[in-house]
Amino acid sequence: MSDDVEESWRSLEPSALLVNLVPDLARTARSSWPILLAVLLGGGVSGIADLSLILLFFAMSAARTLTHLLTLRYRLARGRLELQSGLIGRQHRIIDPARIQNVTVVQNLFHRALGLAELKVETAGGEFEVEGQLSGMRLADAEALRAALASRVSVPTHGEEEPAAVTELGTLELLGYGMSSGRVGAAALIVGVLMEVIAQVRPSEFTTTLPPMTLLGLSFIAMSVAFVLSALGAMFTGWNYRLTRSTVGIRTESGLTTRRRIEIPWEKVQLVRAEEPILRQLLGYGTLFVETAATGVPNEAGTAAAEASVPMVATAELGEVATVLLPRLNLDPWRAALRLPATRALVRALIGTLFRWSVGLGILAALVRSPWPLVLLALGLGMAWLDWRFQGWALSDTVIVSRMGFPTRYTWVVDRRKLQTVVRTAGPLQRLFSLARVEVWVAGSRVVLPDLMEADADRLFDQLITPLATNPVR
Amino acid sequence: MQVNFTGVDRRIVTLWRVQGLLRVVLFWGPVGTAAALALSARWGWLGASVALLLVALQLVLALVWPGLAYAALRYAVREHDLIVERGVLFRQVVCVPLSRIQHVDTRQGPVERLFGLSQLLVYTAAGMAADAAIPGLDESAAAALRDSLARRGGDDGV
């Protein structure tokens, strides 16, 4: 298609209303469940009034979606994707394919039943939004538009050649991923709900101080339910997971009910992040995330997330798979000996922990009059030591590596060509110990390196900015 | 340090002092007085003294801190990058390659306009907030620097 060609405006399929309305209402219900729960359980208001309020809530959400879908038009004009929508407030958006960070094709259950798909196009602009979102196109149209956009930039074009499979995940791996995701918050919520249920069903038996065994039992049930839910969630989102690579980038595909396919050109990858929760480390796995300059494709919960991920990678293969995601990676952070943070950084971390924990534990000690606060303090100091112990960093001519954290270990691998800003910071406690810290900012993310001695931090700062400038700073 | 840094306009010290004094008069003064009255009812002169001491501390900070912040603030525009150093307690050195600059703003509040000063804000693709900020520039110097930095092109790394 020539760049001069200007297509006529096109609308989404009429069945897009159904496809979008149901998930939209489900999202509304999910994001506003505390309000809905309060309205449903709150006393004093009549049932009809409660119901009206809820209906009004959903009607407003539905009206917004309907207006958007009915007024949404799109076309390819002079090689650019144009979108317009709105009834009262009109919006006209033009997206240059050269600015596209990633393209996602999504098919949820409704899409699949009706032969439709959703095309998502993300640029580096905006704040936590998908810049081009077309949900309810015919699958063939979505593929054609994706191919047309890809022909103008180096978005991976998998249509012409069979992409090479890099990783595929089985059921056991997905279960392991779900169960090692850690759901302490969810477990606490379930304990709360169970206690509320007991209080409602058997108020006479409910006292403010539950027997320890009951609490223990509730916690056990809650943890079990949280683990099962987490495992099921992983199965749904990661089902039939496949990572492939072409000559210009990577593609991930996964999902049981909602099938999601994400394509990212290598030239748009800003960094690769590895996340290794302690439980996943014990299973011998880690998770890799790819981040571009896009401000985040909203995940199932509607919050920003990394653009693509490889949920379960055997620890021994983390470096290898990371190289597929970021081909410029020329050292293996899981095999190479990383450089350590300064020894004095441990002293600083211990003092920081003492300072942070002492206030809370002091209050606790005054209240409970037992040695437990001291035990907790020792635990905090131990955690600080472990955190320091597992930190590290490395610098090659193409990437910067930073490792932090315990019990979850994080490793960042940043493409040096993508550096936007380099920052050297030193707080009062750091300066007391002649320490400093270097941060590297890329589009969409900021990566902090471990505390180093001032001279080392200065040297690293210079090494990072030298390819970008001509004279060293220090 | 092998960089030829430039300091900002000395008038920024007076401007920051005026802003600090306004904060003390309009916020800390009334809050401190109310707190002193409330605390004196319970702990007598000791309670009132603590509240008034905090207000006095704010006053001292408003007068002393600007001088320290001014001494710590400097910048350099080099061939390929902009370097800004700032921070009294938390020292920070920021290096922004000129090719990465997405846009440059100059900003003036009412008090800054009164002093003829302007703040320069440099944005890259790294985030929504400015990567580097240089307050206390003369209006014309800020405008010239803004125009000069905004003109630089190159690979933005995105």
Image (spheres, grey):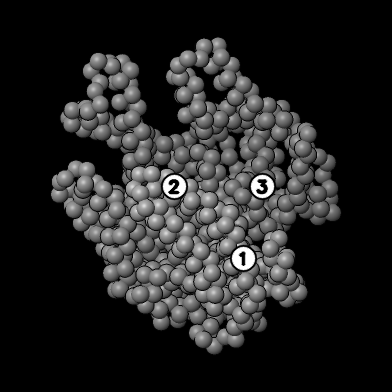
Q: Which mark is residue B18?
A: 1
Q: Which mark is residue B37?
A: 2
Chain label for disc 1: B
Mark 2 surroundings within 10 Å by alpha-carbon count, few (fewer than 14), some (14 through 19), many (20 or more):
some
Residue A461 in the image: above or below residue A350: below
Q: Tell which of A84 and B5 is nearer to you.
A: B5
Mark 2 or 1: in front is 2
Residue A196 in the image: above or below residue B74: above
Q: Residue furthest left?
A: A371
Dot 1 falls on a residue whose secondary structure is helix
- Residue A72 in the image, given as x and y percentages of width and height: 74, 36
Residue on which disc 3 sits? A131
Q: Tell which of A46 and A158 is nearer to you.
A: A46
What residue is shown at x 63% (from left), y 36% (from top)?
A117
Instruction: Identify the amino acid type marked 1.
Output: Val
Mark 3 or 1: in front is 1
Instruction: Identify the amino acid type marked 2.
Output: Leu
Q: Could you tell me how many numbered marks the image carries?
A: 3
What residue is shown at x 48% (from left), y 47% (from top)?
B34
What residue is shown at x 60% (from left), y 67% (from top)?
B16
Q: Find the distance from the CA under tag 2 to the CA under tag 3.
A: 55 Å
